[in-house]
């Protein structure tokens, strides 16, 4: 046997000037000289890196495995089998031998683990043209009125200087007059019923003493006083004559008996015209009036936020809700639109649950809540911030079409969220803090940022290249260091700044709680 002759049962490797020819019993393949093919089995050819050889002038020459032996002491070395990296490893019940100790789960599909491949994602350094795009131009901020307070009539000097003046902007004489009328009407209906539980609030002759606007205002003042001066226990202690309670003003405002009567018979809507089937029929007219005043007296600034609010209550009705993650777990849920600059409540809706005629749309409850609250602010360039309950790609695109910019955190399992970003938890495990990746679905920018955990967000107003430096704590040698600066996309900073409008409004309300239990209407 001569050098270069093929070994029986093996394949021959023949090289010409620029090509490598590999011959197997099954196929013949030609490849560039920079990439050779090593035969692993009669039917498989696997790429193996072979050092590029310089062309040799003259007649063709033959390369054998021994030509790569630097010592050149052996006349022939058989070609070694190339090591093949498996692209997939399949483990199933049928692939284990009889003596195998591996145990599989009965009835499960074969588990396939693919080789880890690093995929390139767009990050801070990749150019984002952002908006405007040819078909996606951000709307300018052009509100229908000047942002800020709008008081009816001329604003004269030395007017609107007392808290009572601002209070009467909302509790107008018209509203107080309606409450007086409806309370008296409801009292007559209840006292006329011999089986009514309210008979004890009648006068000695069984009649009802009509209430007046001044008396209703005194009742409201007393409730506000209860919120400012807190007494533990029942409200009756505000009228106590004991030394411990000296100095309380309740007796000078309203008698205890009259206070109980008004709290039992107070009515804010016409008791004779309550629409059947409406869970909010006892307060619907009053709520509509207050919502109208909130929007009439103030034009919000550009940045607004929508979130839910819980009004604490344990009453028995079909509108009471339970939210386990809220500080107030039981109560009435409100959808609130607030100005992010000062926490002013611009508009709100009461959630009364599912009801006939108010079916949820195909886009979900969060979508319907946002579109209803933002209906009066379309095509004015407002920028809305919401949390993951409301956010969806569909909502962001629809609001952009209506001239409203959008930013909000989002859950990865939303069906329209980019598929390439849905493995955020696994991706973040191998990334340092501050890493970001993004993808564009015009006009929506989808981003994921690694903080304590990965956070996903979408926006129609941000650019992926805009970033800031934020300080985070880091544990080094068992000691927490605070000077640990990491990168953060500007959209996340803006969301943290403007999203908490409703929470700030709740904090303001919590300082002066005027809620008091009353008898069921």
Image (spheres, grey):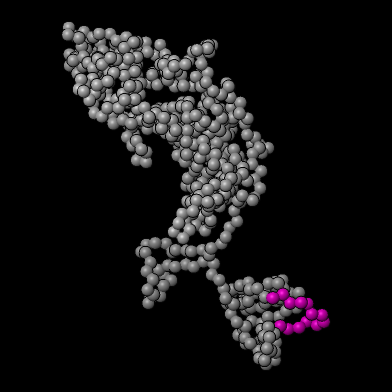
Please state if 175 lies on the left or on the right of 203 as rendered.
right
Q: Viewer-proximal residue, 185 or 344?
A: 344
Q: Quadrant of residue 506?
A: top left
Part of the protein shown in magenta: 51-63
Residue 318, x across and y down, in percent: 31, 29
Q: Is residue 62 left or right of residue 272?
A: right
Snapshot quadrant of residue 233? top left
Q: Residue at x 51, y 63 (%)?
A: 114
Q: Looking at the image, which is closer to me, 457 or 511?
A: 511
- Residue 463, relative to residue 160: is it above or below? below
> Within the magenta stretch, is there residue 64?
no
Determine whether, in the image, residue 374 is placed left or right of residue 333: right
Percent of width and height locating residue 434: 54, 51
Residue at left 23%, top 17%?
A: 256
Establish if 389 lies above or below 433. above
Majority secondary structure in the magenta region:
loop
What percent of the width, then of the height, locates residue 112? 47, 63
Identify the residue at horizontal 53%, vertical 63% (top origin).
116
Q: Is residue 27 visible?
A: no
Above or below for 54 versus 448: below
In-front residue for pair 150/372: 150
Residue visible at 57% across and 60% down in the picture: 118
On the picture, is 488 further left or further right than 217?
right
Q: Nearer the viewer, residue 130 or 155?
A: 155
- Looking at the figure, which quarter contains the C terminus? top left
Q: Is residue 97 visible?
A: yes
């Amino acid at each position: 046997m001569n050098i270069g002759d093929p070994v029986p049962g093996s394949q021959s490797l023949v090289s010409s000037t620029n090509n490598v020819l590999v011959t197997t019993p099954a196929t013949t393949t030609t490849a560039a000289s920079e990439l050779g093919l090593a035969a692993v089995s009669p039917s498989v050819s696997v790429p193996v890196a072979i050092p590029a050889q310089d062309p040799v002038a003259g007649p063709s020459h033959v390369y054998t495995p021994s030509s790569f032996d630097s010592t050149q002491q052996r006349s022939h070395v058989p070609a070694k089998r190339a090591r093949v990296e498996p692209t997939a490893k399949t483990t199933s019940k049928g692939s284990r031998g009889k003596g195998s100790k591996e145990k599989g789960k009965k009835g499960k599909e074969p588990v396939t683990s693919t080789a880890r491949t690093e995929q390139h994602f767009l990050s801070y350094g990749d150019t984002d043209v952002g908006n405007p795009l040819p078909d996606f131009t951000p709307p300018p901020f052009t509100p229908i009125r000047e942002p800020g307070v709008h008081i009816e009539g001329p604003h004269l000097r030395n007017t609107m200087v007392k808290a009572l003046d601002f209070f009467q902007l909302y509790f107008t004489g018209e509203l107080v007059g309606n409450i007086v009328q409806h309370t008296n009407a409801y009292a007559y209906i209840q006292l006329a019923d011999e089986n009514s539980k309210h008979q004890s609030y009648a006068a000695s002759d069984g009649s009802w003493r009509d209430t007046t606007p001044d008396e209703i205002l005194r009742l409201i003042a007393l409730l506000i006083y209860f919120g400012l001066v807190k007494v533990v226990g029942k409200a009756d202690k505000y009228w106590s004559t004991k030394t411990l309670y000296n100095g309380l003003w309740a007796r000078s405002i309203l008698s205890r008996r009259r206070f109980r009567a008004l709290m039992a018979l107070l009515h804010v809507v016409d008791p004779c015209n309550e629409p059947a089937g409406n869970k909010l029929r006892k307060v619907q007219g009053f709520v509509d009036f207050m919502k109208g005043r909130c929007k009439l007296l103030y034009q919000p600034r550009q940045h607004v936020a929508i979130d839910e609010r819980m009004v604490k209550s344990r009453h028995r009705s079909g509108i009471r809700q339970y939210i386990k993650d809220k500080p107030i777990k039981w109560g009435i849920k409100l959808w609130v639109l607030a100005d992010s600059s000062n926490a002013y409540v611009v508009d709100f809706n009461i959630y009364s649950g599912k009801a006939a005629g108010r079916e949820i749309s195909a886009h979900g409850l969060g979508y319907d809540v946002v579109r209803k609250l933002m209906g009066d602010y379309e095509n004015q360039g407002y920028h809305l911030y919401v949390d993951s309950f409301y956010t969806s790609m569909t909502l962001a695109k629809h609001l952009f079409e209506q001239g409203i910019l959008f930013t909000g955190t989002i859950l990865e399992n939303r069906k329209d969220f980019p598929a390439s970003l849905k493995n955020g938890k696994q991706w973040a495990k191998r990334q340092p803090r501050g890493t970001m990746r993004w993808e564009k679905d015009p006009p929506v920018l989808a981003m994921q940022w690694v903080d304590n955990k990965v956070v996903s967000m979408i926006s129609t107003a941000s650019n992926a290249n805009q970033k800031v430096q934020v300080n985070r704590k880091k544990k080094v040698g068992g000691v927490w260091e605070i000077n640990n600066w990491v990168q953060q996309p500007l959209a996340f900073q803006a969301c943290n700044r403007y999203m908490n409008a409703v929470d700030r409004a709740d904090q303001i309300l919590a300082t002066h709680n005027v809620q008091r239990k009353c008898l069921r209407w």
